[in-house]
Image (spheres, rainbow, N blue to C red):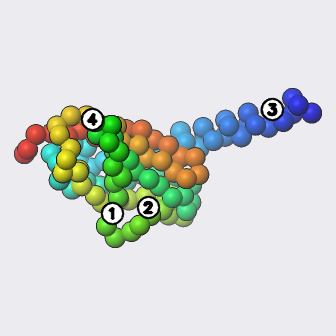
């Protein structure tokens, strides 16, 4: 009995990884100075999954990116998201970690490059 419970837990864990590996996210443009308008488009999320997009600045400060028009970013019925936002005003030039985290186990880590003024 103990062995079959472990096997079931292992299968659930593996299937969670398989779902997360299908996620594809593109940032347009992929870099720019602070206040640059960007689009974050993603596929491979679960239908209806709520998504957080978190940028970690150099001091370790975490900032949620999203839109002013919605409180929650939600994947559509095909598992897609499309968000228009901007690079935060306080972001200094450098490369920062951007995490896209779903409330149903989806996860994608990327980099966002902040450049000097145009």
Q: Quadrant of the N terminus?
A: top right
Picture coordinates of residue 46, whole percent (x, y) = 57, 55
Residue shown at 41%/67% (left/top)?
71
Circle 1 crowding by C-alpha within 10 Å: few under 14, some 14–19, many from 20: few
Q: Earlier in the sequence, mark 2 or mark 4?
A: 4
Q: Is residue 109 visible?
A: yes
Quarter of the figure that contains the C terminus: top left
Q: Nearer the viewer, residue 59 or 115?
A: 59
Label disc, if present, on residue 58 of the rendered structure: 4
| Residue appearing at x 27%, y 50% in the figure | 28
* Dot 1 or dot 3, earlier in sequence: 3
Q: Nearer the viewer, mark 1 or mark 4?
A: 4
Q: Are marks 3 and 4 in contact (CB under 8 Å)?
A: no
Mark 3: give few (<14), some (14-19) or many (20+) Cα within 10 Å: few
At x 73%, y 33%, the residue is 10
Residue 67 numbered mark, or none: 1
* Label 3, label 2: how far apart the Cα atoms are: 34 Å
Q: Residue furthest right?
A: 1
Between the residue at mark 1 and the residue at mark 4, the CA separation in whole angstroms equals 23 Å
Where does label 2 land, which residue? 73
Label 2: how many Cα within 10 Å (few below 14, some 14–19, many 20+): many
- The residue to which callout 3 is attached is 6
Residue 100 versus residue 96 in the image, above or below: below
* Residue 33 in the image, given as x and y percentages of width and height: 15, 45
């Amino acid at each position: 009995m103990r062995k079959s419970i472990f096997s079931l837990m292992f299968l659930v864990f593996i299937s969670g990884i398989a779902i997360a590996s299908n996620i594809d996210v593109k940032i347009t443009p992929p870099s720019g100075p602070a206040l640059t308008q960007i689009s974050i488009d993603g596929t491979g999320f679960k239908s209806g999954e709520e998504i957080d997009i978190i940028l970690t600045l150099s001091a370790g400060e975490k900032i949620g990116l999203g839109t002013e028009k919605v409180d929650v970013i939600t994947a559509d019925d095909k598992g897609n998201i499309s968000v228009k936002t901007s690079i935060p005003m306080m972001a200094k030039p450098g490369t920062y970690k951007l995490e896209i985290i779903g409330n149903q186990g989806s996860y994608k880590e990327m980099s966002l490059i902040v450049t000097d003024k145009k």
